[in-house]
């Protein structure tokens, strides 16, 4: 039976993703440790994977995605302990963005870009951390990732209990990703790897040279704009992502301009996580309207900053990163056309 109504718009996965971030953030709030919000949120990103997959396949997708997220978080934390040296950070970024692109393509993960791996690495590297604090922060992310893994797999039990009713109440599990062993031989995949690597290096370098306060946002914007491997290099899709991100900045300004209490900021994060998960599989540009406020709200919880600087940096660096991404999309289209003519 074809899913209708609420089931067709992924309410099930939306609630699951929202719960994955809401529970740990509320616990941290009750303990007075919202300075650790970033690590909990990045661990909760585990719940974003495995959507709409049968559980025998989902267990692989969620497990490998959770491990990749934890590796990105841990690498970022230890770079922070070292003082975020630019040379080491640059090498780590290239490894994560290139390896992440190959990783998500080979395992056919959704989301199909290394965006969350890059975001986790750079934010964690940007938070001052001592050696004594490193393992507890990584451990927190790991605990939340395990909790998110359990939530993501909990639908198996829900479906068992629901019986025949699940065809109406829950989303059908139609997506069947397979392990793609051809990625290393596919020039289209390597073209996307090259786009991401060149884009993050150029965007990060320009943002740093101009002294932007949050240079990593320019890098994240590049990764958000560049299409997944083997996807069409469409300017319209890239523009959707740019306008989605800018709209998200405007939404953030409207939500945070009055310096709301921490509980309200947590509510913003939870609602944005829910809406982003509802939309990410349908229209990524629309999802960015919610992903961006979520990212900014997490940054605000972890290290509060004046809203004007926060939003201003985000707009400037989004335009920078997106502009570089558009140039790389155009170059990729030219390469693909030339290759097609040569063939």
Image (cartoon, rainbow, N blue to C red):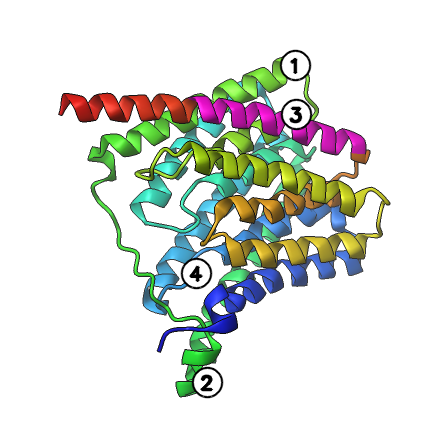
Residue wearing tag 3: 316
Disc sitting over residue 210 in the figure: 1
Q: Which of pointers 3 and 4 lies earlier in the amino acid sequence?
A: 4
Residue 16's x, y, as percent?
Answer: 55, 65
Q: Which of pointers 2 and 3 lies earlier in the amino acid sequence?
A: 2
Q: Residue furthest left?
A: 343
Q: Using the rendered view, name the quadrant where residue 190 is placed.
A: top left
Residue at (68%, 41%) from the top-left corner? 296
Disc sitting over residue 37 in the figure: none
Residue 291's x, y, as percent?
Answer: 59, 46
From the image, give the main secondary structure of the stretch colored magenta.
Answer: helix
Asked whether 255 falls inside the magenta stretch, the response is no
* 3D distance between C-alphas at marks 2 and 1: 56 Å
Residue wearing tag 2: 162
The crowding category of the residue bearing disc 4, from other C-alpha atoms within 10 Å (few below 14, some 14 to 19, many at least 20), is many
Q: Residue furthest top?
A: 209
């Amino acid at each position: 039976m074809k899913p209708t109504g609420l089931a067709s718009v992924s309410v099930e996965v939306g609630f699951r993703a929202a719960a994955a971030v809401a529970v740990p953030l509320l616990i941290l709030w009750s303990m007075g440790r919202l300075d650790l919000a970033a690590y909990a949120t990045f661990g909760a990103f585990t719940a974003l994977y495995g959507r709409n997959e049968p559980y025998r396949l989902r267990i692989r997708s969620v497990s490998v995605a959770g491990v990749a997220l934890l590796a990105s978080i841990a690498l970022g934390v230890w770079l922070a302990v070292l003082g975020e040296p630019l040379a080491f950070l640059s090498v780590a970024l290239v490894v994560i963005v290139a390896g992440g692109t190959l990783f998500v393509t080979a395992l056919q993960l959704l989301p199909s870009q290394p965006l969350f791996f890059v975001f986790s690495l750079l934010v964690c590297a940007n938070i001052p951390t001592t050696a004594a604090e490193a393992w507890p922060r990584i451990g927190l992310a790991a605990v939340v990732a395990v909790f998110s893994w359990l939530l993501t797999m909990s639908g198996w039990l829900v479906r068992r209990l629901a019986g025949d009713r699940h065809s109406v109440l829950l989303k059908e599990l139609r997506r069947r990703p397979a392990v793609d062993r051809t990625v290393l031989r596919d020039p289209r995949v390597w073209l996307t790897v090259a786009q991401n690597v060149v884009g993050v290096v150029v965007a990060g370098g320009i943002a740093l040279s101009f002294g932007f306060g949050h240079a990593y946002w320019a890098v994240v914007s590049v990764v958000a704009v560049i299409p997944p491997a083997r996807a069409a290099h469409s300017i319209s899709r890239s523009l959707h992502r740019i306008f989605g991100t800018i709209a998200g900045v405007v939404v953030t300004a409207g939500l945070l301009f009055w310096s709301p209490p921490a509980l309200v900021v947590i509510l913003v994060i939870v609602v944005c996580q829910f809406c982003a998960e509802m939309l990410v599989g349908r229209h990524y540009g629309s999802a960015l309207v919610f992903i961006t406020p979520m990212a900014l709200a997490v940054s605000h919880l972890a290290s509060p900053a004046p809203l004007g600087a926060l939003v201003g940096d985000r707009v400037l660096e989004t335009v920078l990163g997106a502009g570089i991404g558009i140039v790389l999309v155009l170059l990729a289209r030219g390469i693909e056309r030339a290759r097609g003519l040569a063939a």
